[in-house]
Amino acid sequence: MLQTANGFEGTVERTIKMATQAQRLHDKIEQVFVPLLEGETSVRESSVMPSYIFVRMRMNQELHFLISSLQYVVSFVGADRGGRTMSGQMQGSRGFVRPMPMSDKEFSDIVALTKQNRQASGAAEAEFAVDDMLEVLEGPFKGLQGPVLEIAEDAQTLTAALTVMGRDTPVQLPIRHALRL
């Protein structure tokens, strides 16, 4: 598990994949996984674990240094080795972090979480009717509530009356961004 700068998970994933190809590390780095909701591409709104990515690899000192020194990589998640006083307080820099390996079951649970959330939001999509109250879950109107005014024929978007700057405003949004109350 690798901690990255918030919002740069995709950039770190691409950088690791490019380094894998350039340095012929296919036998050492098997997979790089960004935990996004299934079918989504935006990290900002659909990350199951923001600021974290998973790298399945055979760890060695060279790979640890390569990945740790990439731009936007904070550190591996693991046990801190160094930089502590006798009482356990941080002292100076963070020091070496020994990555903690994940079991196949732990990894498959994370992958299942990305699929489960997508299915749960998909199940709620078909339940809207005119005058139902909803709450916006994603996008610029996140957190706002209001009644459904209209549902598009394709059943992918709806129009809701949301209070924006003190006025009821009809707003069109994807059904998957809304939760029925």
Image (cartoon, rainbow, N blue to C red):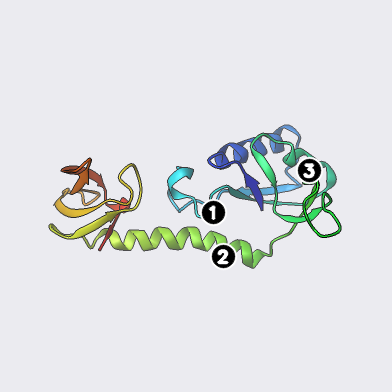
Give how far apart the Cα atoms at labels 1 and 3 are: 26 Å
Q: Dot 1: few (<14), some (14–19), or many (≥20) neighbours within 10 Å?
A: some
Q: Are marks 3 and 2 in contact (CB under 8 Å)?
A: no
Disc 2 residue type (three-letter)? Asp
Residue 21 lies, with reference to residue 88, above or below; the image says above
Q: How far from the left and from the top, in percent, is residue 126?
A: 24, 60
Disc 1 residue type (three-letter)? Met
* Mark before the other along the chain sequence, 1 or 3: 1
Q: How far from the left and from the top, in percent, is residue 169?
A: 17, 42
* Mark before the other along the chain sequence, 1 or 2: 1
Could you tell me which secondary element the residue under label 1 belongs to? loop
49 vs 152, nearest the viewer: 49
Q: Which residue is mark 2?
A: 109
Could you tell me which secondary element the residue under label 2 belongs to? helix
Give how far apart the Cα atoms at labels 3 and 2 are: 33 Å
Q: How far from the left and from the top, in percent, is residue 81?
A: 83, 53
| Residue at 66% across, 53% down | 1
